[in-house]
Amino acid sequence: MKKKFNWLKFFYTLGVILFLIGTLDPLEGSVLIALGSMVLVAASRYKKDRHYKAFRIHAMLIIIGVFFLFYFSSLGGFGGTSSLSWWWGILIIPYPLGWLMNVILLLKRAFYKNKGIGDP
């Protein structure tokens, strides 16, 4: 008997892998982290997972933080000899905050029995 391929589980796993690969270098891998977060949101949305809203909030935080990370980089950074104050760095805080919340949720899903799509 042939089992049907589960595309949603594949995309969930792909999102986790992209997220983890981006984590190896959080600055250069920020695009992979944002992409992995968006894939996790899509997979959890179509599966009607109970953690969908949490994944969506985390992805929005990551995308906002990564946007400002690239924006400030295009302006030459902030602090030091730059014309931007160090206080502008506050706008990057959603990126590590969303990343940390996503890591906690993924660890929670990995170690506790849930009825989500990413459970073993």
Image: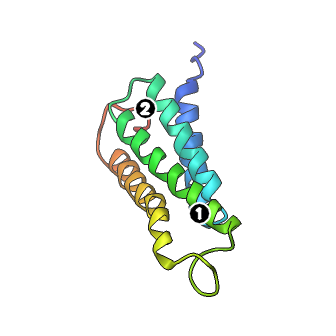
Give the secondary structure at mark 2: loop
Depth order, front residue of 91/63? 91
- The alpha-carbon separation of the residues under discs 1 and 2 comes to 31 Å
Count the marks: 2
Depth order, front residue of 75/112? 75
The numbered dot on residue 118 is none
Tell me if residue 99 comes above or below residue 24 in the rendering: above
Residue located beneath label 1 in the image: 69
Tell me if residue 39 comes above or below residue 93 in the rendering: above
Depth order, front residue of 79/44? 79
Mark 1: amino acid: Leu
**37 left or right of 98?**
right
Mark 2: amino acid: Ile
Residue located beneath label 2 in the image: 117
- Location of residue 71 by image quarter: bottom right
Residue 112 position within the rendered picture, expressed as x and y whole percent measured from the top left: 29, 45
Q: Residues within 10 Å of mark 2 (few under 14, many from 20)?
A: many
**104 left or right of 36?**
left
Residue found farthest to the front: 83
Q: Residues within 10 Å of mark 1 (few under 14, many from 20)?
A: some
Identify the mark nearer the N-term, 1 or 2.
1
Residue 14 position within the rendered picture, expressed as x and y whole percent measured from the top left: 60, 41
